[in-house]
Amino acid sequence: MAATATYNSATKALSVSSDALPTPVSYGTFPNSENPNTVQVHDWDHTFEYRGGTFGTTRQFEDNTWTQDGFIRSINISVNDLTNFTGGSPNIAPGDHIMIDFGDNKKQKFIFRGTIFTSIAGEFWLATDSRLDIIMADSGTGQNGTYTFYDQRNGRTTTPLGAIGMSANGVAIFNPSAGTGGNPPSGFSWVAGGDAPFVDFGEDSCGGHPQEQGMYHYHDPDFLECWKANSTMASYNDYYGSTQYNGNNIRHPDGHSKMIGISFDGFPIYGPYGYSTPWNSLSGTRVMTTSYSVKATEAPGRPDYGNDQDNPPAGTLMEDWEYVEATGDLDSFNGRFGVTPEYANGTYAYFVTVDPLNTDNVKFPFIIGPLTRETITAPANNGADPQGPPGGGGDGGGGGPAPTLQIGAQPQNVTVNGGETATFTVTSQIIPENGPMAYQWYKSTDGGYAYAAVTGATTNSISVTALQYMTGYRYRCRITGPVGAPPAENSPLDSNAAILTVTGGDGGGSSTANRFDSTASGFDSTQQTFDGT
């Protein structure tokens, strides 16, 4: 089964679904000497608020106007604002990164310094009980306007153990911590990921392993090497297959990483490459660096830094790490504000962290930090719903092989004149014994990044009237079955995508209805399907 996600733009709810297996990447042998668990198929479903293209929670003040004198831009706050600002739950704390959109092309990140005076551009402070002073990079006099203030009212939440996101191949992303697993020193937790974790939890060569209920999952981005091998993900999802950077399908043509998953606080997770300047997509790309480093002095109560179980090495425990402001590109959550290829107007996003000098080596905190930007909507029981070992057929055994869906003829690219009918067809069967199958066609209007279900297209072929603006549209079919019986082990199965090319005019039938040619897609209803997010 492929990982799928359906987005409801009206409610901003994103629903993800998977069997928790690393399709199309294989996994290692379990149980093994370090991991006693067997990989299980899971009926994995979870719904949460999607915040891609946003900066988090807005904070409302009674007066949302600003004035500027010199380099200082001031925001007036009331007594109620002050109480809410410094005494909320949680409150704004010194060192927090805040996004302010002034509506004058000065959307910017600022660092709050509490009641300590600052004159550094990009910082702000509580100047009086009724005013916040923000230090701008450019001087101005007599200027004024309105603003939108984004804060961390719901943020700075300790990242929960277990599932905190999902990767694009349907595997759950877990906290960087192993919790109390592996018998760490009292009051401490082992780091679960990394290139050489002190406690071996039996990771396979793709960086994953199953937990007690058999859910295969990742703690760090080692899996990206398996995704890139032989362009594995490129053959699985058009988002990765349609473009690449110097042969790397996990990066956009301009070098920026593609999304490799999504956090359950609603923000996208990117690979390690971002724009050199957060708000300039023409600034080139480079590896995004972590702002975490190992503490020079042991945490209180921790055994001395050493090389054995009684005195584990520095960096092997979660409590060994600290966030140091401005030492890297990313904040304490392991993300940043900026533009991305998917979000030309900006977003908050997480980035996986690797060694800039050797990107095969991962760096703490790997994917998401010890804190999250917004509150994680965690799935119950980590989403675990065991369905039995892979390939078991789910019918309790009957002696025969499990049914498998097989595509006979894939949909083919079609070229027609404008106004003519284009038809795409797929053929399929179930082996070893054929049976009834269900079909649902999907189309993409943005080169294969997002797919929407085509209403009523539920046979093995689809016919559309081709209009000129539809050139580049992609169509593919999702097949499920056997209907009315235990499903095939690879059900649902997605066909390859076929591309529509329209030549000439539209024969007088041109229409721009339901057309989104820029960063959005055509919507056939209130829901949109994103395959593989």
Image (cartoon, rainbow, N blue to C red):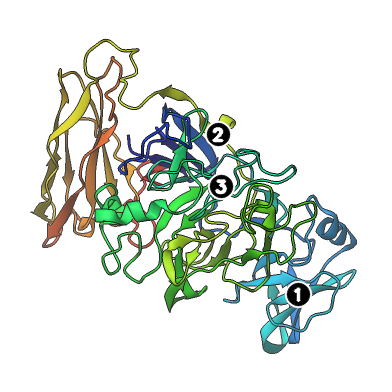
Instruction: Please name whichever residue, 312 or 333, is drawn nearer the observer in this view of the structure.
Output: 312
Q: Quadrant of the N terminus?
A: top left
Marks 3 and 1, the one that precedes in the sequence: 1
327 on left or right of 10: right
Q: Residue at x 71, y 46 (%)?
A: 188
Q: In which quarter of the view is residue 456 placed?
A: top left
Q: In which quarter of the view is residue 273 placed?
A: bottom left
401 on left or right of 22: left
308 on left or right of 229: right
Label placed on residue 124: 1
Whole-percent x and y of residue 120? 73, 83
The residue singled out by tag 2 in the image is: 382
**Please, what is the three-letter code of the amino acid marked with disc 3?**
Ala
Please identify, in this view, whether the residue under mark 3 or under mark 1 is nearer the observer.
Answer: 3
Marks 3 and 2, the one that precedes in the sequence: 3
Instruction: Please name whichever residue, 170 or 498, is drawn nearer the observer in this view of the structure.
Output: 170
Q: Residue at x 29, y 49 (%)?
A: 237
64 on left or right of 241: right
Label placed on residue 192: 3
Discs 1, 2 touching: Cβ within 8 Å? no
Whole-percent x and y of residue 95? 74, 67
**Please, what is the three-letter code of the amino acid marked with disc 1?**
Phe
Whole-percent x and y of residue 479? 24, 31
**Please, what is the three-letter code of the amino acid marked with disc 2?**
Asn
Q: In which quarter of the view is residue 348 placed?
A: bottom right
Please identify, in this view, whether the residue under mark 3 or under mark 2 is nearer the observer.
Answer: 3
Vertical relation: 440 (above or below) 512? above
